[in-house]
Amino acid sequence: MRFFILALFIISFFSCQKEALETSFVHIDKFTFEYPSGANSSDIVDAWVYADDEFIGGFPIPCDIPIRKAGNVKINVLPGVRELGPYSLELFKYVYPAIYYIYNPYLTEVNLKYGETTTIYPVTKYKDKSTLVFLEDFEKNSHILNDDEDKNAQTSVVFSTEYFKNGNKGGIIKLDTTNNVCTVATDLFYSVPTDNTPTYIELDYLGNSIQVGLIGVDDKTGQKSTVIDFVLPPKTEWTKSYINITQLLNSSQLSKYQVVLSTSMPLNENGKFASLNSFVAIDNLKLVHLN
Ligand SMILES: [Ca+2]
Ligand SMILES: [Ca+2]
């Protein structure tokens, strides 16, 4: 019996040793996003990793990724973001982890050694086969968010030199108890794919909760339909949002679309205004899709 226990101990000791020895590690500190010019805002928070085409997992950055391989190994890292989209539930705090297919994956080959850590420095940019339909970074003298959907001229997007994420200026919507709702849309309608091609609205914002959606129009009938579905929670720090509108476009099948933003004065639990005034600041509003 004593021999048996000892043997078991020796076997399990060596099998543990073997497992530890047959693992290599890849370290990622940061996933860098490169933008040729202007607003380079991104928020890549996860690395989705393949080693020699085998899926290893999704890892919050920074991370040490265990890989049970040694020697030359092809590492493919896909950029992961927190996306707001058709699967958003309060359970996920409005967002869920997703691979951002509009950015390139990062491919490299490393020489791994068991028990050792190799650091890689992934970089990405928009895929060549993608289209930036528009970028509003508020750096020019005019902006593209002037379609006053709420019909109250007192509420609008104005320039701010105090609140901006990148550059020198941002946009801001200021509200008070009298002028307590602001809904604005892009001046232009845009043609975007409705055939399930990945399509996103990107937005940096700070302040009030903001709702984001689309106004679509049918070219033949002239009929308009508005869906303002995506709720971005209030934030006290600049937050980058990736809003997946692929499914919304596919289900609506309209000729062209405006992007629409809406915000209102926060209410307290009694349904009264929680303050005398409030604001939401925005920057780097983009509409982007794969080709
Ligand atoms: Ca800006
Ligand atoms: Ca207005």
Image (spheres, rainbow, N blue to C red):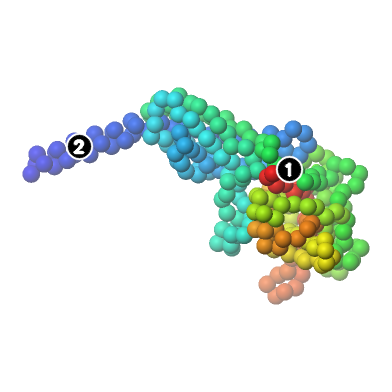
Is 174 located above or below residue 81 in the figure?
below
Q: Can residue 276 be seen in this view?
A: no
Report whether the residue tagged 2 is closer than 8 Å to ligand 1: no
Of circles 2 and 1, the one toward us is: 1
Q: How crowded is mark 1: few (under 14 residues within 10 Å), some or many (20 or more)?
A: some
Residue at the disc numbered 2: 11
Q: Which amino acid does label 1 sit on?
A: Thr
Report whether the residue tagged 1 is closer than 8 Å to ligand 1: no
Which x, y percent locates residue 155? 87, 61
Q: In which quarter of the image is the C terminus?
A: top right
Q: Earlier in the sequence, mark 2 or mark 1?
A: 2
Which of these two is toward me, 219 or 156?
A: 219
Q: In which quarter of the image is the N terminus?
A: top left
Which of these two is toward me, 253 or 154?
A: 253
Instruction: Quadrant for residue 156, please give it.
Output: bottom right
Is 105 located above or below residue 183 in the figure?
above
Residue at the disc numbered 1: 131
The residue located at (78%, 36%) in the rendering is 38
Which x, y percent locates residue 208? 74, 59
Residue lying furthest bottom: 270
